[in-house]
Amino acid sequence: MREATLSKDELAKLAELAKRSRQILLAENLHRVAFNPTPILLVGATYAGTWLEHNQDALLLARFVPEGRDNAWATVEVFLQRQRADGLLPFCIPRGGTHHPYFKADAVYWQLQNVFPFVRCAVAIADLAHRPLEDFQRIYEAGCRYDEWLRMHRNRSGSGLVEMYCEFDTGHDNSPRVLDGGLPHSCPGNDAANMPDLTCMPIIAADLSATRYGDRMALAELAERLGHHAEALRWQSEANALRRRLKELLYDEETDFYYDRAPQGLRKYRTEHITRLFLNHVLDQEEFDRIYKRYFENPDEFDTTFPFPAISAADPAFVKSCPQNCWGANCQSNTAERAIFWLKDYNREDELRRLLAEWTRVLVESDGDFGQEVNPFTREILPSGGKYTPTLLICLAAAQCFCHS
């Protein structure tokens, strides 16, 4: 059992690292884009922009750094401002906009890359930033348009769930789960509406479907809050229907796990995508406890020397060399950052303390290398340029947990 406490020396070092984290977040990881005057939160030193899959970064900034709440809201605002006319949200707002050497645009629509429900995250940030009522209505309308876009363009199977068309749709770079079948990095023509011509298509994705479920639940809550009572009931009903279909099509009783489905059948990769079902509250407490115990309390699966690897260590597809930027092996700070939400939601506060303590020890041992990923066996932070926003925010979460408890 991992220790959920820190020594006096570790606590002192954590306090220093947390102070440095706040300074980096506010001084180096905020940047202004051409179409919005308030600086937005960047993903980190080696990522020149903000990504939709990192929207929880802005939420944690608003929670842990009150003086950054306007920046957190601006990071939501830029996605609202650049939602495409057909309803698609950009997956990235590049720093440098049309002058960016790679993206060459001020908003990019090549894939989905959405994990934490946009509506739920945007509402939480708007609450913390004390935004006016009209901003909540804008969030609601944007969420409705995005859900309709998914119905139109990511439902070729007719399942009502969400399909994956490319490697980067889920943000699982270099994972066997999203490489199997020859999937391209981004969608054909650099447009998320386009499905590649592959025999494995369309692939119904467990995590993308879970995120849509989470957003529909958030739309139901927001509709009720705005006084749209009939719409709230409709969104609740549609969320429940999606959840049932997810269970019917993507759950495997034998292994007690949820997988993607291609026309050929289930694609049985045990990756951290299951945590995105936790994040979006797809599972009830009983089912969560059962799956968590079987896989996340098992050292042969996800409870490795350093938790949690991006794919079960017992999965035959695990990439044993643990190369850099590999969601086929390494423990990603994105996974740990999102666990801050779901471990608490599923009454696993002690496990959250242990996870934060493990990240603290690694950060202390590395003298504050705020990198992106950790080798699950050696506990070494892999080189990635540092100053990675999710890792900086994990540090602040640990400081709040241990230095103020």
Image (cartoon, helix red, strand yellow):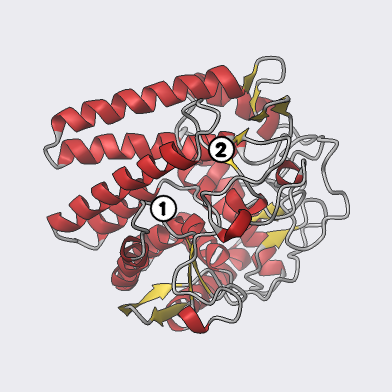
CA neighbours of label 2 inside 10 A, class few (<14), some (14 to 19), many (20+): many
The image position of residue 389, as x and y in percent, is 53, 68
- Where's the C terminus, which quadrant? bottom left
Mark found first going from the N terminus, 2 or 1? 1
Taking depth in this image into account, of 249 and 99 the one nearest to the observer is 99
What is the count of numbered marks?
A: 2
Taking depth in this image into account, of 235 and 15 the one nearest to the observer is 235
Position of 334 relative to 215 (above/below): below
Would you say 201 lies left or right of 148 here? Answer: right
Would you say 4 lies left or right of 323 here? Answer: left
Residue 237 showing in the rendered view: yes
Q: Which mark is residue 163?
A: 2
Residue at 29% x, 30% y is 235
Residue bearing the label numbered 1: 88
Would you say 199 lies left or right of 233 here? Answer: right
For the residue marked with disc 2, what is the amino acid?
Glu
Toward the left, the furthest residue is 227
**Callout 1 secondary element:** loop
CA neighbours of label 1 inside 10 A, class few (<14), some (14 to 19), many (20+): many
Instruction: Look at the numbered discs 2 and 1 and tell me whether their residues touch, using CB distance below 8 Å.
Output: no
**Callout 2 secondary element:** strand
Taking depth in this image into account, of 348 and 128 the one nearest to the observer is 128
For the residue marked with disc 1, what is the amino acid?
Leu
Taking depth in this image into account, of 45 and 65 the one nearest to the observer is 45
The image position of residue 86, as x and y in percent, is 36, 52
Dividing the picture into quarters, in which one does residue 344 lie? top left
Residue at 24% x, 63% y is 129
The image position of residue 249, as x and y in percent, is 58, 21
Q: Which mark is residue 157?
A: none
Task: Tell me the distance, in whole angstroms, between the alpha carbons under discs 2 and 1.
Answer: 15 Å
Residue 5 showing in the rendered view: no
- Where's the N terminus, which quadrant? top right
